[in-house]
Image (cartoon, coloured by chain):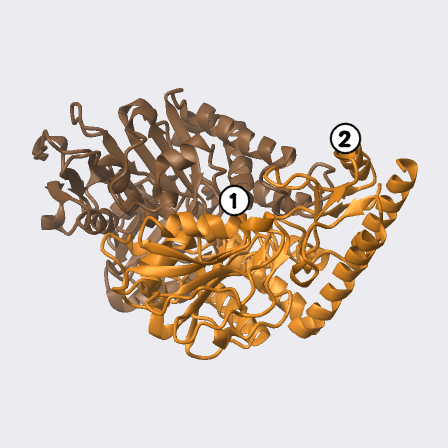
Chain colours: A brown, B orange
Amino acid sequence: MTQIFNFSAGPAVLPKEVLAQARDEMMDWHGAGMSVMEMSHRGKEFMSIAAEAEADLRELMSIPSNYKVLFLQGGAHSQFSMVPMNLLRGKKSADYLDSGIWSKKAIDEAARYCQVNIAGSSKDKNYTYAPSQVALKLNKDAAYFHFTSNETIGGVEIFDVPKTGDVPVVCDMSSHILSRPMDVSQYGVIYAGAQKNIGPAGLTIVIVREDLIGETIAGTPTMFDYKIHADNESMYNTPATYGIYMAGLVFKWLKAKGGLAAMEKINIEKSSLLYDYLDASDFYHSPIAVENRSRMNIPFTLKDAALDESFLKQAQQNGLLQLKGHKLVGGMRASIYNAMPIEGVKALIEFMQSFAKANA
Amino acid sequence: MTQIFNFSAGPAVLPKEVLAQARDEMMDWHGAGMSVMEMSHRGKEFMSIAAEAEADLRELMSIPSNYKVLFLQGGAHSQFSMVPMNLLRGKKSADYLDSGIWSKKAIDEAARYCQVNIAGSSKDKNYTYAPSQVALKLNKDAAYFHFTSNETIGGVEIFDVPKTGDVPVVCDMSSHILSRPMDVSQYGVIYAGAQKNIGPAGLTIVIVREDLIGETIAGTPTMFDYKIHADNESMYNTPATYGIYMAGLVFKWLKAKGGLAAMEKINIEKSSLLYDYLDASDFYHSPIAVENRSRMNIPFTLKDAALDESFLKQAQQNGLLQLKGHKLVGGMRASIYNAMPIEGVKALIEFMQSFAKANA
């Protein structure tokens, strides 16, 4: 069988070693006589799994002790409401950076709860770059500043945390969390759906500074209150136990790989291979400004869109899956998360070369 | 190794055959070259998994075509808010049956959004029976009537759907859905967390009559709007894909067992074995009214609570796990969901007999 490489934007490729361990432990976790899926979330076995997952994530990201780590459900979409519901704290407005489709979703939901100030936008160039720090129109009375540090669909990554003074920074890191070291202390809230760089869909990680927890707007569902989950160590209700277990295995895998600094080196190497090839090619094109090119999600176009379908079909025949770009931007997209081996990127480039040659 | 039987109230035992299939398919689902966890939720492989899971659930429960089946996240706790947020539809109050700890949680959350009328309560006898149909004080202007058809902690099951005229019936079936046939057409909304009789924690199933969908109260988060999920076939955001896959395997397992009528027979047999033993014993006691005894969650006490700890310890040594009753009611609790084989119930009774003899 052809070796398969899965370039899906999410749910996405997971480390083979992690999947193999999950398979081996499926029927009996560490002699407990049961699957992790069958464990009471309040039993000592699962409590140890959850505690270890949190400890490993804290170590990987160097999360300061005044931050809570929450293992929630509902994805980034739920955070789009939870953020204003928890962070407005009596204020009337929030600043949002408009850098693409995902930030737009966050903006639309927040606008239902407060006045949203667009602190900067790259809409003028179809979201192919990130509004720079210089251009930001910040609002001193904003309850918080929100940005999407990696636009999964657009392929735009923001490498510097915007400076906002005393206004807490909130960040949707869904599609590049754990891809490189991030200085957590620069953020008020970090959130991420698991299904790209962490584990299976259905788990959402929220990292929140303690002083921002505790005041919600009227009508906030109890399940949308950070304080409820923080006070109950993410066990107010039954959490996505298997997702936490899988995330824990991924955290161990990352530690074994050398942690986030090591991952960053690998991710620079992998993404550079592909960007260098795109830039050298007349056949393919990356539309993204060089300084904002995502190391995780790499959209590109063919010189003739009429060839798209045949590109995708032949790619699939060569074991290169899920390369179709999002319908809102078209073209192709290669998502090369932590778990994508460099061999996958090399195989993709090799195929792209031969396809370009055959269709020159 | 001793055979293990897991009596956890949830997350709970899953069918061994289902876990074995999940293990075998972990690295490569049906030749797709990837794990189900790695599949895009919008790819044809996962779409087929989700469609088949829904079709099988519809078949098992004979769900009429004017009901939507939603695969959501957030557990019953999220439904406690979603139900009033979606079902009040301009009305000011809702009727709730107060039959135990879980119905109380639903009541407390609903009271944040509307006036809650307690249509009946069994608090007078410490929730050891279900308020009968005769005793219900129904309110004609209620937006809906809510009850918890199986109290997981109390062990109280309601076998007849309360008659409420034109007022839609909303039911939390988390801990006994799929344990017997239910006439879905008698309900407006049925909801259930998956982690008892369906699959892994993190998946929530909502079955909702179409005419009840579409009007939410102001401030409802988009993710709490049934219409959003119904219109997008549970793919508005990334659903708990692996949970849906596992639930689908459980549905197939139930169909192979003969469906819900066959399961009911088995569940009557299993639960009768234990209740008959409890009733015949002077050493153990079931506090629950005979007509409301749950077939899924069976709490019982020892004649001397000082023996509880030694009972639990010896049970564990005999491979009988998670028998401790909920801290709010004390004593023991054996949860014997669909996936608990009759051998587990027999092993439990055998152990109980020998423990009673040794401590007579």
Which one is in front, B300 or B257? B300
Q: Quadrant of the N terminus of chain B?
A: top right
Q: Residue type at mark 2?
A: Ala
Which one is in front, B347 or A161? B347
Residue A344 in the image, given as x and y percentages of width and height: 46, 47
- Same chain, labels 2 and 1: no
Q: Residue type at mark 1?
A: Thr
Residue B219 in the image, given as x and y percentages of width and height: 24, 52
Which one is in front, B142 or A2? B142
| Vertical side of A136 occupied by B85: above or below | below
Is residue A323 left or right of B132 when viewed as pictured? left
Residue B305 in the image, given as x and y percentages of width and height: 75, 34
Residue contact at pointers 2 and 1, CB within 8 angstroms: no
Q: Quadrant of the C terminus of chain B?
A: top right
Q: Which mark is residue B321?
A: none
Q: Chain of mark 1?
A: A
Residue drawn 34% across the image and 65% down it: B143
Q: Residue furthest bottom?
A: B65
Circle 1 sits in a helix, a strand or a loop, which is it? loop
Which residue bears the numbered disc 2? B306
Residue A89 in the image, given as x and y percentages of width and height: 22, 34
Q: Residue furthest top?
A: A65
Q: Tell me the quarter of the picture where residue B225 sits.
A: bottom left
Q: Which mark is residue A238?
A: 1
